[in-house]
Image (cartoon, rainbow, N blue to C red):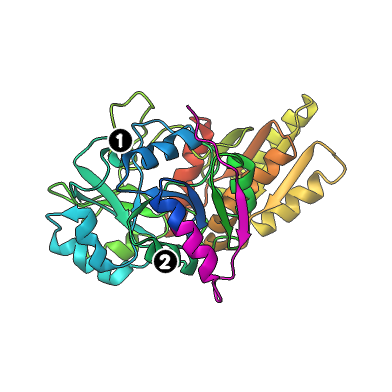
Amino acid sequence: MTYTASTHVFQLDEIDIDAHLIALAADILRHGGLVAFPTETVYGLGANALDEQAVNNIFSAKGRPLSDPIIVHIASQLQLTDVAQDIPNKALELAVTFWPGPLTMVLKKHHQIAPNISANRDTVAVRMPSHPIALGLLNAAGIPIGAPSANRFGRPSPTSAQHVLEDLNGHVDVIFDGGSTTIGLESTVLDLTGEKAQVLRPGGVPLEALRRFLPDLEFKPQYLSETEASLAAPGMLTKHYSPNAELRLFLGDEQRVVEAMQQSAETLLKAGKRIGILASDNEAMNFSEQFENNDNAYVVALGSDLEQIGAHLFAGMRELDNHHVEVILVHGFGSEGLGLAIWDRLVRAAEGRVINI
């Protein structure tokens, strides 16, 4: 049965946080309810990570498969031993450097964590967010909070409270509106349970930064189906982060890729399709000029650098969905820094529709 609730939206100032509202939400979490809150990456849908039924409410509200694990959020490094056990020294070293922040580490799970958090595996994905509202809620609740992205399963991740409301109105008790998230891409997931550390999902902490501590660290993409018995970490499904429209991802030499996108757009428009284009600021200007007289073409400018593009990617997908486009065209933005995380999200959103030029 789908989790239902009367949804209340509260605006919070991250500099002057309303302690009364935080206490109210913390009490809801302790009693099995759901609270959506901003982090530096995306908005999370939180529940008591110690309460199996509360965690089940997350799966119910999102329509999320039980095989897809949920990240556990903690308020301090000291709380790590309440969530994980047999913690390697490297994890402690990384926590000192990257927490609070967008790094999730997969460790051996503490027995008190609800088994359905991690699809009944003996591991747990854990991180400490840096957003003041998230930390305030975690501290007030006094419990670890399990929180995937606060959206319907498979949809583009929410980077604003409005995105959460669009997907989960009536399925979450409280939504804290803390404005748009800054990174806009989920955390990097690093598995430290095997013989060799492995990135399972690129994200807000680039591989280059982690390689200062783990020189041989690699990311080997794993695209799994919902029928897999259980996933090692969140965000590993082939179809994920997807808009309603069909997304086509173009890869290759930038100039040739842009030309191919322009040709593809012309062909689709002649066929009567409503199209959307996601592009950097300069490219968006050129696309807008090309299609300025066509009411069936919509262009969204994502920004001028990787940080801006990453921050606006999911919001751009949702904006084009609101225009009811049928096809979205976008190209990759390299594999350096946040470019790798952007590429990973686009590959999954494209569901195999990747055109190599």
Viewer-proximal residue, 260 or 313?
313
Res 250 label: none
Res 231 label: 1
Disc nearest the viewer among 1 and 2: 2
- At label 2, the amino acid type is Leu
The spot of residue 19 in percent (x, y) is 51, 70
The spot of residue 286 in percent (x, y) is 74, 52
Determine the image quadrant of residue 181: bottom right
SS label for mark 2: helix
Task: Report whether 43 appears left or right of 264.
Answer: left
Magenta range: 1-26
Queried whether the magenta region covers residue 311, the answer comes back as no
Residue 255 visible somewhere in the drawing: no
Q: Label 2, on which residue?
A: 135
The spot of residue 11 in percent (x, y) is 62, 62
Instruction: Identify the residue at image location x=32%, y=56%.
Output: 144
Above or below, 347 against 105 in this view is above
The spot of residue 266 in percent (x, y) is 75, 34
- At label 1, the amino acid type is Leu
Viewer-proximal residue, 357 or 285?
285
Badge 2: how crowded within 10 Å, few (<14), some, or many (20+)?
Answer: many
Viewer-proximal residue, 175 or 211?
175
